[in-house]
Image (cartoon, grey):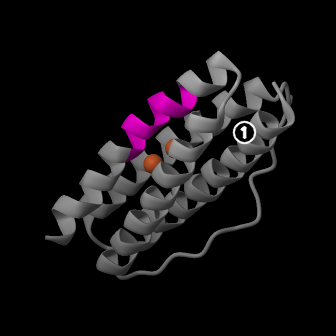
Amino acid sequence: MNETDKANVEKALGVEISNTLFYKCASKKVKEIDGQKLFKILSKVENEHASVWKKILKLDKIKMEPPESCVEDYTADLNDSHAREERAIKFYGEAAAAAQNPRVKEIFQAFIEVETDHLKLSEERLK
Ligand SMILES: [Fe+2]
Ligand SMILES: [Fe+2]
């Protein structure tokens, strides 16, 4: 990996940790069962993404911090989710385009697909 790829992968790890913690928080805070289930699944997927970056960076442990805040209001958390997924998609697109390492490029491209599915999950509920 060159310096740019490494910096982007490190940033991506931070994004995935932040999103994992946000979704975990939201899954415990919302009253709606649909929301609890949705955010629990999303937290699990983002945690898996964090693990992929962890492996690429050859780290043996990652710190799940700092804590992320969320609110009890389902719609507000869906809006937060939407903004988070939009940011991830935009950044991953830039990182994929800039990537020199083929494996890193491939992962960024694959994650764009997954984050786009996540974006749709909040969009269909915010309609
Ligand atoms: Fe992710
Ligand atoms: Fe996502």
Q: Seen from this angle, which residue lies furthest top?
A: 102
Residue at 19% x, 64% y is 125
Quadrant the N terminus occupies: top right
Q: Is residue 4 left or right of residue 75?
A: right
Residue 80 screen position, x and y as percent: 43, 72
**Numbered marks: total:** 1
Query: Would you say residue 13 sits in the magenta stretch?
Result: no
Residue 19 screen position, x and y as percent: 56, 56
What is the quadrant of residue 54 in the picture?
A: top right
Which SS class for mark 1?
A: helix
> Main SS of the magenta segment?
helix
**Vertical position of residue 87 compared to residue 60: above or below:** below
Query: Would you say residue 108 sits in the magenta stretch?
Result: yes
Residue at 83% x, 29% y is 2
Question: Which residue is tagged 1?
Answer: 9
Q: Is residue 15 left or right of residue 7?
A: left
Residue at 61% x, 48% y is 16
In front here: 18 or 32?
18
What is the quadrant of residue 58 in the picture?
A: top right
Quadrant the C terminus occupies: bottom left
What is the quadrant of residue 56 in the picture?
A: top right
Q: Is residue 50 left or right of residue 60?
A: left
Q: Is residue 88 left or right of residue 39?
A: right
The boundaries of the magenta stretch are: 107-115
